[in-house]
Amino acid sequence: MNPNEYLNKCASLTANMSLNKDLLVQFCGEINEAETDRIIEEFESSFKPDEKLLRKRLLIIAVEMTQNLLRHKMKGLPCSFICLRSGNTIEMISLNYIPARLSDTLAFHIDQINNEVGGSIRNLFRESLRHAVISDRGGAGLGFIEMRRKSNNPLLCKFHPVDESISIFELMVTLNIQS
Amino acid sequence: MNLNIASSDKTPLIRALADEGKIEIRGRSIPENSLGFYEPIFDWIRQYAQTPAPKTDLIIELDYFNTSSSKCLLDVFRLIESIALSGHSCLVTWIYESDDEDMMEAGEDYKEILNLPFDIIEKK
């Protein structure tokens, strides 16, 4: 899939996912720091003043997702981020190219995090924080745990192979407002 | 030898007063390059640790922060911990907004990890 095909796929995915839902934020293209700032600004402004705590919790997840897109972007290739709202459910979805060889490791890591529930996610976060190291790309290796913890839902991921060396990583984080 | 860094949309206000032994971090902390932002603070505390005030107060009042900042905050706490271990009085005050469970829990996480006097205070 070339970048143009990818952009078309993003557009069609967004159209399908957003049926009967409010589209709060949509980005598709080559990401940079200015774009992550714009996404977060747009995201913040899409909540009502009385949703302050909800907005903060969602912002933490959105910041982790968009900064992951920025840190792990593949040169010259686009990525996307959308946020949808339907009643009491918020969905945040990111799509980005990754080296195909990382798919299994990533899937295993997310699966392990998803298997943690309740207090054990918190313990996992504490233990991971205790031993965290900032990587060359600027991450601390805590983002997925934080997304799982704050959303209180398993992280959903899919890998769409493009060719032997590249896959598209799709990540969906869902948050039920009453939780 | 004081340190003043104004807040921005993505970084907190930093105010460090050596004579008073007071360090404040307030606002939101979501920079892409957390290490780049916090490095001057690490440097300041390392220098301050050579002749610290009789009592060091670290006050944290954050709206929210990203996970790379959470690691940098832990490093700030570790530096204060080393001042405490050398026999000086140190206190961390973690202030969170009323009803903000996430920030309260974040304070509890650090309190659990650290070996430092650590007050968690709800701001009314």
Image: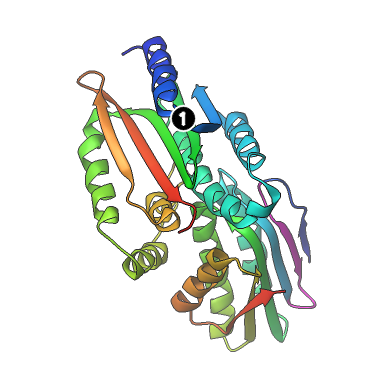
- Residue B59 on the magenta span: no
Please name the amino acid that badge 1 sits on.
Answer: Asn
Q: Which residue is mark 1?
A: A20
Name the quadrant of the C terminus of chain A. bottom left
| Magenta span | B10-21
Q: Could you say which is closer to the camera, residue A67 or residue A130?
A: A67
Q: Residue at x 44, y 24 (%)?
A: A14
| Position of residue A85 measured from the top left corner of the image (x, y, whole percent) | 50, 39
Q: Is residue A24 above or below residue B88?
A: above
Is B115 positioned to the left or the right of A119 in the image? Answer: right
Is B13 positioned to the left or the right of B73 in the image? Answer: right
Secondary structure beneath label 1: loop
Q: Residue at x 68, y 72 (%)?
A: B59
Q: Quadrant of residue A6?
A: top left
Q: Is residue A17 above or below residue B15?
A: above
| Position of residue A5 measured from the top left corner of the image (x, y, whole percent) | 37, 11
Q: Is residue A110 above or below residue B14?
A: above
Is B61 positioned to the left or the right of B68 in the image? Answer: right
Q: Residue at x 56, y 32 (%)?
A: A25
